[in-house]
Structure formats: structure tokens, C-alpha cells
Image (tube, helix red, strand yellow):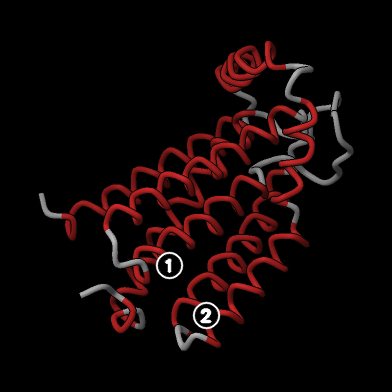
Amino acid sequence: MTAKKTWPWLVGILYVIFSGFVWSVVTQQAWINRYDDLIYGWLAPWHPAANNFFITFTKVGNPLIMTILTAVIFVVLIWAKHWRLGVFIAANNGLGALLNHVIKGWIQRSRPTEQLIRETGFSFPSGHATAAVMFFGSLIVISYCLVKSKKWRIVLAIFGVLLIILLGLSRLYVHVHYPSDVTAGFIFATANLVIHWKLGQRYYLNAELPA
């Protein structure tokens, strides 16, 4: 099966899995609690040695910081005459934040109570996890378009994925999200990113794609 035929199936599977998480959280399925407890158990030995790192690192995903970073990159890309890529990252982060806000307001899952930092609002899905995929995932796409060296593309992609994972882990470590919140945020955002990437390739990113 070619990549052209594979990606719709991949996106469909991701949305089905995300829908499963939504249904399980809304109906309070027992497996969600077991899943959350399992992941929390893996992170427990890291406390308190990694407190300072994760309390600091989790701030990278704060809405204000993400908005500033996106705006700066957008302006730089426009200045460098890569406006299409600027639109790509701005749309990803804007739409990602909007969809996350809407779903949170619908699900209305309460956050964990024993937090290392103070967070308010609803918990599912994780806004930081969504933002991490949309922001760093966009940067991976941008590096694919602008970096000529295949080796460096791979290095930057691995680095981007690492940052996504760390930002998601940071939300669990500081106990402001359940593991199911973060997992669902990753899955939902990945599906959305792939769709926009494919639409971008078809309608407006052709001029940016490597030869």
C-alpha cells in the first residue's frame, strides 16, 4: 500500500482511538483508571529528583509562551519569504488550541488534585500535549522543507519528537493531567497535523517542498 493510500487509514485509526478515549472518560470506564495508575506508577520513582527540571520545562507549553514562539517563527518565516510555512504553523497552533478548548468544555473532566504547580480549568485532553504536537510537529515539517541535509532532517525530527514526549511527561510529573489526558492529546493532535500537512501539500505548500 502506497503512502498516498496509507495516511487516510492512519488518520482514521487515530480518530477512532481518540474517540475511544473520549467515550471511556465520559462513561468512566475502569480501564482508564488502571491506565492512569500504571503510567503514574512508572513516573513515581523520579520524584523528587526531577522536580526542578519538569516544573521548569512544563512552562514551555503555557499558552502565552507558545503564542509568542509561534508569532516569532511566523514573522521570521514571512520575512524569509516562506509565508506558506508561516501560515502552516500559525494555523496548526491556532486551530489546535481552539479544538482543544471546545473539547475540554464538552468533556469537563476535573484535574488531579495533588498538583506540584497550580493549574485550573478542565483536564481532558491535555492542552500542553496538543500544543506540543502541533508546534514541534510543525517545526519538524518546516525543517523537512527548508533543511537540505537528510541527516539533519532526521536529527531535527528526533529532537522534535523528544521535546513532544518530554512536554507531555512534564504534565504528568507535575500532576496536572492524567496520563489518558496526555495520550489523547497526542493522538488527536497527530491526526490533525497529518490532515493539515496533506491538505497543505495539495493546496498551498507545493512551492516549499524539497525537490
Disc 2: CA contacts within 10 A as few (<14), some (14-19) or many (>=20): some
Q: Is residue 205 above or below residue 104?
A: below
Of 35 and 67, nearer the camera is 67
Q: What residue type is labelled 1?
A: Ile
Find residue 50 and report its horizontal and vertical position in percent. Answer: 73, 24
Which of the numbered marks, if any, corresponds to residue 78? none
Q: Mark 1 points at which residue?
A: 142
Q: What residue type is labelled 2?
A: Leu
Q: Mark 2 points at which residue?
A: 77
Find residue 151 and report its horizontal and vertical position in percent. Answer: 29, 52
Distance in Å between CA atoms under marks 2 and 1: 10 Å
Of 15 and 47, nearer the camera is 47
Disc 1: CA contacts within 10 A as few (<14), some (14-19) or many (>=20): many
Numbered-mark total: 2
On-image quarter of the C terminus: bottom left
Instruction: Please report contact status of discs 2 and 1: CB closer than 8 Å, yes or no.
Output: yes
Point 35% across, 63% down: residue: 144
Give whichever of discs 2 and 1 has the lower sequence position. 2
Q: Quadrant of residue 172?
A: top right
Of 77 and 28, nearer the camera is 77
Q: In which quarter of the image is residue 32?
A: top right
Mark 2, secondary structure of its residue: helix
